[in-house]
Image: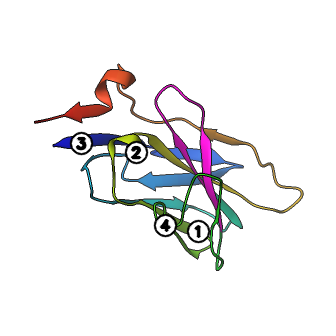
Amino acid sequence: MLTCLLLLLGQGSVFGALVSQKPRRDICQRGTSITIHCEVDTQVTLMFWYRQLPGQSLILIATANQGAEATYESGFTREKFPISRRTLMFSTLTVSNLSLEDTSSYFCSTRDTAPSTDQRSEQEPQLAPSHPASSLVNSRP
């Protein structure tokens, strides 16, 4: 049986707002799904979902606007990565039918579209494995 470890952002700040993400990390079995919850302590217009494969840069999965369907980037689908955005302070990303290729870190970020808002974001995972490449994937017979 193959399992994969998903590392997820715990907390970070975006233009002075606190972004919380749960679970912080999870080990999942192939073929199952995981739902990641992202909450911000203030109302924001846009939320973004990213993934970061081991040793690579962040890649945008989709942009979610409250009350509208998420806009997916090339290579990502609503079927594999369904996103919910029920309120201006909350979003979820589900990674469906997990496979070894889904072993990754997943991040949410947010932005307010007001012109005077500082839109820089800072995110630091709270816990990281000491040897990411060797500890992300666990193969079991």
Amino acid type indicated by mark 3? Thr
Q: Earlier in the sequence, mark 1 or mark 2?
A: 1
In three-dimensional space, the C-alpha distance between marks 4 and 3, rounded to whole angstroms, equals 21 Å
Q: Which mark is residue 102?
A: 2
Q: Quadrant of residue 116?
A: bottom right
Amino acid type indicated by mark 1? Met
Tell me which segment is drawn in magenta: 49-64
Number of dots carrying numbers: 4
In three-dimensional space, the C-alpha distance between marks 1 and 2, rounded to whole angstroms, equals 26 Å
- Report the side of 119 relative to 25 (left or right): right
The stretch drawn in magenta includes residue 50 = yes
Labels 4 and 2 touching (C-beta < 8 A): no
Q: Is residue 21 above or below residue 7?
A: below
Labels 1 and 4 touching (C-beta < 8 A): no
Q: Who is closer to the viewer here, 14 or 78?
A: 78
Amino acid type indicated by mark 4? Pro
Element under disc 3:
strand
Residue where numbered disc 1 is placed: 89
Q: Earlier in the sequence, mark 3 or mark 1?
A: 3
Labels 1 and 2 touching (C-beta < 8 A): no
Q: Earlier in the sequence, mark 3 or mark 2?
A: 3
Residue 99 horizontal/vertical position (percent): 33, 48
Nearer the observer: mark 1 or 4; the answer is: 4
Q: Which mark is residue 82?
A: 4
Q: Kindly identify the residue that appears in the image at 35 percent across and 19 percent down.
A: 131
Q: Which mark is residue 3?
A: 3
Amino acid type indicated by mark 2? Asp
